Amino acid sequence: MDTRTFFDIMGTAPAAVTIVTTTDRLGRPQGLTVAALCSVSADPPLLLVCIERRSRTLRAIRERGAFAVNFLSGEGKNVAARFAETVPDRFDGLDWHPGRLGLPILDTVTLAHAECRTTEVLEAGDHVVLIALVEAGAAPAPHTRPLMYFRHRFGPWPGEVEDARAGGEAEGPELSAQPRRSHGAGGNGADEVTATAPHPDWLHAAHSRR
Ligand SMILES: Cc1cc2nc3c(=O)[nH]c(=O)nc-3n(C[C@H](O)[C@H](O)[C@H](O)COP(=O)(O)O)c2cc1C
């Protein structure tokens, strides 16, 4: 099958947009935009993410053996665009705090997050599948809407969000054992700039960028 058709088939499935973060050897935050992720197992709680082999963030994740998945809110499309582009510091001006595992959790634009330790690394074509144990995290607040990616465009989930849990409140506090600290210059990077992704097709962009 030709690549274009493959992308068009896969683009039929709307996907949640996340920022996968970690820290490098010097403790600096690293991260990239990821839409290829899903849950794998409930007991133990496992998820997977697929990351292109030559990703710079992947290198740091492999060294650290851990990463956080930040699920973006409907207002997070500029952050999604920024973490898919080549900029000197993707965290510049963004508020974030270290979670329980010390992994970067983005403030303001993150609806929910999961902090994970990598348990398996599967080589799969030009990507790597990371299977990871979710050790900490926070569920979304009621009625919050995620950022979606569909047919090369960003947009918030289009409808009202009913809360599936009784009482309307997500149970349990954030599991982070550390106090929340803010980093960065204070902006959340969530300003409206564009409704489209930085590249017509992120897979194609990833393949052709190096
Ligand atoms: C909406 C969207 C979804 C993306 N999903 C993924 C993904 O699931 N896996 C991946 O490797 N790259 C994905 N990318 C592309 C990376 O974010 C992009 O190539 C980034 O520059 C990689 O950064 P790094 O090399 O610094 O890690 C996506 C980009 C966009 C805009």
Image: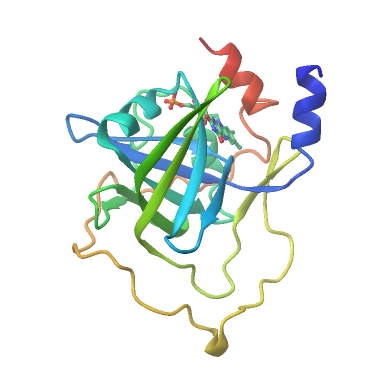
Above or below, 83 relative to 44: above
Quick one: 39 or 157, which is closer to the camera?
Answer: 39
In the picture, residue 73 is in which quadrant? bottom right
Quick one: 17 or 76, which is closer to the camera?
Answer: 17
Question: Could you tell me which quadrant the N terminus lies in?
Answer: top right
In the picture, residue 54 is in which quadrant? top left
Seen at 77% across and 26% down, the residue is 6
Above or below, 116 relative to 49: below
> Residue 23: where, in percent of width, then height?
26, 37
How many marks on residues?
0
Left or right: where 19 falls relative to 117: right
> Residue 42: where, in percent of width, then height?
49, 63
> Residue 67: where, in percent of width, then height?
35, 43
Colour option used: rainbow
Seen at 44% across and 51% down, the residue is 70
> Residue 177: where, in percent of width, then height?
20, 65
Seen at 47% across and 78% down, the residue is 170
Furthest-top residue in view?
210
Left or right: where 7 falls relative to 156: right
Left or right: where 35 falls relative to 102: right
Seen at 60% across and 12% down, the residue is 208
